[in-house]
Amino acid sequence: MRLVSINKIITLVFILSYATSCSIIKFPFKAVKNVKKSIVKNKHKSNNQYERFVRNMSSEERYKWYIRTYSKIAVDQMKKNKIPASIILAQGLVESGAGGSSLALKSNNHFGIKCHQEWRGKKVYHDDDEKDECFRKYKNAVESYKDHSEFLTTRGRYSFLFRLPKMDYIKWANGLKKAGYATDPRYPEKLINVIEKYKLWKFDGSKKQITKSKKSSKEKNKDDSNYVVKKGDTLYSISKKYNIPITEIKKKNKLKNNQLNIGQRLKI
């Protein structure tokens, strides 16, 4: 009788140990599932988990993940508002650093849209062209995509864009710069490069890209993967110029602090 009781106890301990080990094994899958849900819902309790998930990816991994995650939303907005999905995705990638920028992570603002006088939603203050500029804050990324479409379709200065061929991402990219969407003189080039590198034109329904981006011989010979520090440069200004998080620049260049030297060559 005593032997039977001991055997029962041993069996019970084994079952509990096995169940515990199973729950540990299953946890990562549950975590990934929660992260996927938070991408759209972005519940407060999963914000930190979502941020770790995004920041732990390399730049290339994050770009591919961003396209997989938001391409359907971009296509839906294209069908509804006649904005090329390739342009929507490229702007999201460039403006948010493929979802890795502080503005995207903390405020779900994927397109760098500022408050403006008519904005009645939540606000956040962030350094951009000037210090502490007001930017729109959204409940989730989907709301940011919808507001981006509304921003372009309801402002007169963008109206000429909708007379352009909807699959001509080159004309749209240049048109956005002409309309004053961004102050960066290389903005159209950045959008076109991203569209062609990741074949985003496929989301417009095109079977091939329009043309190769035209570059001068000087630009072709330039190594875009390196940047030479100039007088007045800071890690913040360089990160804004290339839409790359400061932490990533420091990691690539093994920088222990934010100090830069004129003439220093950085990997971008």
Image: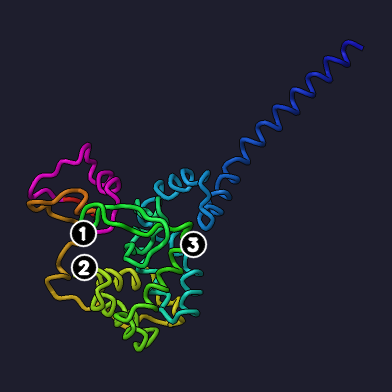
Residues rendered magenta in the picture: 240-265
| Residue 174 - label | none
Which residue is drawn at the image coordinates 20% and 62% (left, top)?
224
Taking the image as drawn, is residue 61 in sight? no
> Residue 69, labelled with which disc?
3
Secondary structure beneath dot 2 equals loop
Q: Is residue 80 above or below residue 68?
A: below
Spot occupied by residue 255 in the image (x, y as percentages of width and height): 22, 40
Work out whether mark 2 precedes mark 1 in sequence or the reverse, and give the earlier one. 1
Evaluate if marks 2 and 1 touch, with contact meaning CB atoms under 8 Å apart.
Answer: yes
Label 3 residue SS: helix
Quick one: label 3 or label 2, which is nearer the N terminus? 3
Reading the image, the residue beneath label 2 is 183
Q: Is any atom of residue 195 visible in this view?
A: yes
Dot 2 crowding, Cα within 10 Å, few <14, some 14–19, many 20+: few
* Numbered label attached to residue 129: 1
Pick the residue in front: 68 or 37: 37
Viewed as shown, does residue 226 lie left or right of 98? left
Q: From the viewer's side, name the closer residue of 194 and 177.
A: 177
Residue name at image x 15 percent, y 65 percent: 222
| Secondary element at tag 1 | loop
Three-letter residue code for mark 3: Thr
Question: For this rendering, which residue is in front, 205 or 39?
Answer: 39
Amino acid carrying mark 1 in the image: Asp
